[in-house]
Image (tube, rainbow, N blue to C red):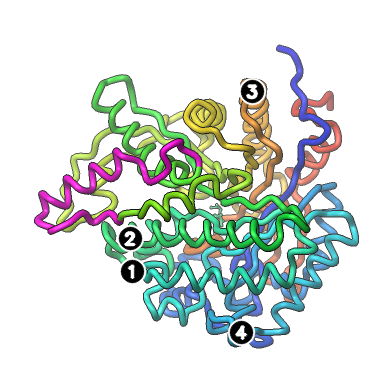
Amino acid sequence: GRIRRFKDDFMFGASTAAYQVEGAWDLDGKGESIWDRFLHQNPEIIPDGEGGDEACDSYHNYKRDVEMLRELGLDYYRFSISWPRILPQGFANNINKKGLEYYDNLIDELLKYDIKPMVTMFHFDLPQTLQDLGGWANPNSVQWFEEYAKVIFKQYAHKVPYWITVNQPNFICVDGYGGKENAPGIGSSGIGDYMCIKNVMLAHAKAYRLYEKEYKKQFNADVGISLALSWVDPLNNITENVEAADIYRDFTIAMYVNPIWSKEGDFPRTVKRRVLERSTAQGFPESRFPVLSPEEIQLLKGSADFMGVNHYTTFLVKPSEKQYPVPSFEDDVNVTLTYRPEWKQAQSKWLRSAPYGIYKLCLYLNKEYDYPLMIITEHGWSTKKVLKDRSRVRNMREFFKALLLGIEDGARVKGYTSWSLMDNVEWSAGTSERFGLYDVDFESSKKTRTARLSALVYKRIIEQRIVEPHW
Ligand code: GCO
């Protein structure tokens, strides 16, 4: 076939998140986050490896991090701000100057070398004090986030061209409220998780509107949201499997994309109908799924300049036989997830290589939605601690080929962000699953970083703009 190349203005970056890399969890006035609390209280969750107390110590090593970005020749760095590092109790009546200073230093170091900051405002590490008030299930969380957004826009808007309001609402809400393995580990779903989704989406929209009103004219950054969008296919063409795939897509893709980019706005009709039916059958006096008012629907519509897509894998689905004792998200969705056996598995159990998925996701989003731009804000692969990470290289190349096909067929993709710049704390898997282009020696006091094979390959792809160079 002919050789497809990335256009010259296509941007390449790498990504991290505060809790996963910073360490210094209680240093210089930082408040406790829900991930600090969760892994301190449940250390047995991490089978092999460690949590985020020290992590990569990027709090002290940020200059080395920027040096790596330069080694790779990247256009931008996606990192996140820790809310409790800036506002230790969550609220703006107590601002931690040392926290502000840390991100000023990091941003200035990036700008010094012409690397654009892409700042995630919230990547899971909610101040514990706000969780004590119910966290994202409390409707006040929308205002808490807006207050926090005011502080960080005021401090950094003049230096930041890309903002991401929140990262992966599904993980925050469905995993955090439904499951017990991710903070805050509430462990009961079917109500709090849906409230959380509503509030997180509204918080996103409020921050977007705030920027639009106060800063857009002057600084003109792009403000978006990052969604975890896996691709979903039916196990085979049997009608009930096709229907199961449709409903799973509605609960995991349309749930977050519809309120912002569908013509009618609001959460998907199929989701609302299904949860209402089940709630009624379960004897609830009204639906467990929350309602958006007409004003809230308007607030959300068009509230992002780009769709940040975090894409890792593909699932095959069929209806589930499982009986659930209590109402839950899983019960509402009611599917079983599987893989094709030939899809190679990463170090993480949930992660398999099925690169055609990004192509199909591009086609699907193009057909269903009128989004302005897409940025792949995460894509990556986990391995053990090895430097010759051939499986990561293979996964990256195959992904790029499929992405280039998607672009050729009309997907408006402006950039690609590798997850991750370096090994880090993979939430409840700790440091046992490594996603880095750079290896991190967590045993060493300096948390020494070493380039992997994939770092060199990524650098060459960025230089040459093609995936299969002649070497
Ligand atoms: C996210 C992701 C990352 C993970 C990565 C690998 O929410 O953006 O959870 O933080 O580390 O997706 O699983």
User: Residue 405, which numbered label?
Assistant: 3
Q: Are marks 1 and 2 in contact (CB under 8 Å)?
A: yes
Report the residue that reaches farthest toward the top: 1
Look at the picture and state if 283 lies above or below 39.
above
Indicate the amino acid at tag 2: Gly
Q: Which mark, residue 186?
A: 1
**Quarter of the rendering occupied by the N terminus:** top right
- Residue found 58% across the figure and 73% down from its top: 148
Which callout, 4 or 3, points to the residue nearer the camera?
3
Label 2 or label 3, whichever comes before in sequence order:
2
What stretch of residues is rendered in magenta?
261-290
Q: Residues within 10 Å of mark 3 (few under 14, many from 20)?
A: some
Q: Which residue is mark 2?
A: 178
User: Type of residue at label 3?
Assistant: Leu
Residue at image location 61% in from the left, 62% down from the top: 210
List x then y, in percent, for residue 286. Answer: 17, 56
- Labels 3 & 1 near each other (Cβ < 8 A): no
Q: Which residue is mark 4?
A: 26
